[in-house]
Image (cartoon, rainbow, N blue to C red):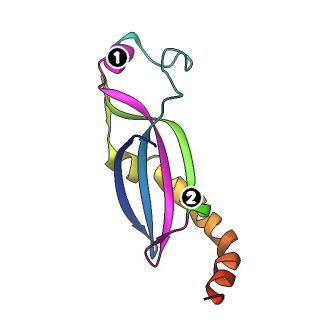
Amino acid sequence: MADIIETRTVHHEGVDYFVQLTHDHDTNPETDGDWASPEDLEWWRRDDWQYVIVTVTPVIAGAEITTAADVLGSVVYGFLPKATIDMDAICNVHPVPDMIDVARDNLRKVRPVLVEALTLF
């Protein structure tokens, strides 16, 4: 089971999107390129920040449409020496706005299947 860190529902253009952050166990700043300064690494070792996986799932009539979800890993979350990247920043600045666009496109693609499934009931 995923280590859920934080969740939020974001409303965008008439659709709700469930945003979930889970711990990204596969990414490590010591081996993930050379972007992190020694101070960044020190703060990471103290658990001031971490990498997360962001999942954005459209919600229609109370049901999460997981086939339309967009998922992005290696997203920085927490307190760095020169920045704070919290859920507000993730939802309002990067990466959720772009992920909503992808999830919305995915939703359009699965819509015929959803409509057909609903007619079976």
Identify whether 68 is placed above or below 2: below
Q: In the drawing, does residue 18 fall left or right of residue 102?
A: left
x and y percentages locating residue 27 in the rendered image: 52, 26
Q: In the drawing, does residue 105 fall left or right of residue 2?
A: right
Residue drawn at point x = 60 percent, y = 89 percent: 121
Residue drawn at point x = 32 percent, y = 42 percent: 86
Q: Mark 2 points at which residue?
A: 69
Identify whether 71 is placed above or below 103: above
At label 2, which amino acid type do we have? Ala
Which callout, 1 or 2, points at the residue further toward the start of the chain?
Answer: 1
- As drawn, the label of residue 45 is 1
Identify whether 53 is placed above or below 31: below
x and y percentages locating residue 66 in the rendered image: 56, 62
Residue drawn at point x = 34 percent, y = 16 percent: 45
The total of numbered circles placed on residues is 2
Identify whether 50 is placed above or below 11: above
x and y percentages locating residue 89 in the rendered image: 36, 46
Q: Foreground: 88 or 28?
A: 28
For the record, the magenta segment spans 40-65
Q: In the drawing, does residue 120 fall left or right of residue 30?
A: right
At label 1, which amino acid type do we have? Arg
- Would you call the spot at circle 2 few (<14 residues within 10 Å), some (14-19), or many (20 or more)? many
Q: Foreground: 26 or 85?
A: 26
**Label 1, label 2: how far apart the Cα atoms are:** 31 Å
